[in-house]
Amino acid sequence: MAQLLKDNQIIDDSWLILDDSAETLPSGNILLSLEQWQQFSDQLSQHNGELGLWLEGNAEIDAVIDSLQQLSLIAIKFPKFVDGRGFSLARLLRERYNYNGELRAIGEFIRDQLYLLKRCGFNAFQLTEDQDLSEASKSLNDFSETYQVSADQQEPLFRRR
């Protein structure tokens, strides 16, 4: 079973990312793309397990935000590590829409980005298999103090003194 970083701990990943060729929903915890979410909309209420959604960084979520609020997991896929749209989407989910569930980074991002991903609201990270999770987890605490307001710090430094 694959592992990931969640809430500063290494855990087993119990979620399956549904393949594009799937014709029915398997039982268990599954992550669907937005297109699959719409394709299987008639089967979602009968699903045996939890449902999550993975989004591209450029996803327009205003129309589906009510459905997203009910999910225990939203994953944001980074197509390459230089694409920062996922950072913005995470902040929107946490700050504008007050999403409180698991927010997972998947796809192409690097260890050096973990601290900033956490600042934007991500609390889970699915790294590639060639990365050492215990070493990568150290990146979540690269800095002891922050100046700016963010998803994980609601007050600027001058207000915390």
Image: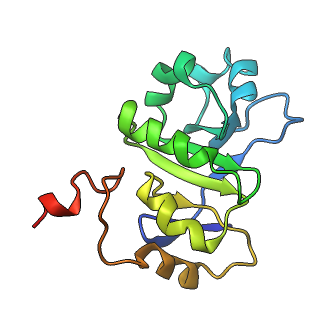
Judge whether 130 appears above or below 59 on screen: below
Q: Is residue 69 left or right of residue 152?
A: right
Judge whether 134 appears above or below 160 on screen: below
Residue situated in front as seen by the camera: 108 or 30:
108
Q: Quadrant of the N terminus?
A: bottom right
Residue 30 screen position, x and y as percent? 65, 42
Judge whether 84 appears above or below 139 on screen: above
Judge whether 3 appears above or below 69 on screen: below
Q: Is residue 43 left or right of residue 92?
A: right
Residue 21 appears anywhere in the view? yes
Number of numbered callouts drawn: 0
Spot the residue most to the bottom: 135
Residue 28 appears anywhere in the view? no
Q: Is residue 74 left or right of residue 155?
A: right
Spot the residue most to the left: 161
Q: Quadrant of the C terminus?
A: bottom left
The quarter of the picture where residue 114 lies is bottom right
Residue positioned 50% across, 77% down in the render:
139
Residue 59 screen position, x and y as percent? 65, 31
Q: How is the image coloured?
A: rainbow
Residue 74 screen position, x and y as percent? 55, 41
Spot the residue most to the front: 158
Residue positioned 68% across, 48% down in the render:
77
Q: Is residue 90 left or right of residue 3?
A: left
Residue positioned 73% across, 69% down in the render:
128
Residue 48 screen position, x and y as percent? 59, 34
